[in-house]
Image: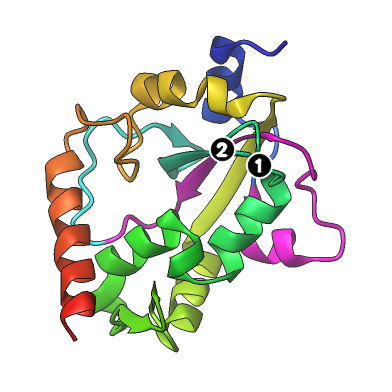
Amino acid sequence: MVTMHTVVDALLSPSRICSRSEFLARSCPVPKEGGIYAWYFRELPPAVPCCRVPEFKGLKLLYIGTSPATANSRNNLRRRIRADFNRNASCSTLRMTLGCLLADKLSIVVRRAGGRLTFGEGEAKLSDWMEANAYVAWVEHERPWSIEEEIIRKVSPLLNLDHNKESCFHRELSEIRRQCIANARAT
């Protein structure tokens, strides 16, 4: 069994990091297994402070996730990361957060589409921004949900809200997301 400390070390100093285009290529290096993943960024989205941000080769670690999130889920690293890189904000907390932070910069707005919240045509702009700025690292783990909270508390990635109330950005990010989502629901 891979320990929490081994996972943290591997996420902070990854042996492999993958861009969006590398992920979407036919030879995608991300396994169809369970695990924990870390999102690194070249450019910080507006409003994100540089307080206690772990770095790897000039990239800043801002978000950590797990897949599957529970024992009953059939999700895996590849499916989860594909949703973050390539789907829409209704399927990805990371995309929703990035879109709210980048709304003014990218001229995108979250809107209701049926019962879901997405950035509509702005999702392509968000994907383009991720192509230029986002990289993902991962560690396989057979029960990632069992160590997620402990890892988030230890690393304190600024874009994670759950298990991360001590983050220097938690209150501000919560408010940015709340306002963005409330505006979408009001229209």
As helix, strand or loop, the secondary structure at mark 2 comes to loop
49 lies left or right of 85: left
Taking the spot 68% from the left edge, 47% from the top edge, the residue there is 75
Residue 69, label in figure: 2
* Magenta residues (range): 18-45
Indicate the amino acid at tag 1. Ser
Q: In the rendered image, which quarter is residue 71 located in?
A: top right
Q: Mark 1 or 2, which is nearer the eye?
A: 1
For mark 1, what is the residue?
Answer: 73
Q: Is residue 81 visible?
A: yes
Assign the N terminus to one quadrant of the image.
top right
Q: Residue at x 54, y 11 (%)?
A: 5
- Is 154 situated above or below 22? above
Q: Are the residues at dot 1 and dot 2 in contact (C-beta closer than 8 Å)?
A: yes
- Does residue 23 lie above or below 108 as drawn? above
Residue 59's x, y, as percent?
46, 45
- Give the residue drawn at x 46%, y 79%: 123
Image quadrant in which the C terminus is located: bottom left
Q: Secondary structure at mark 1?
A: loop
Res. 13 in view:
no
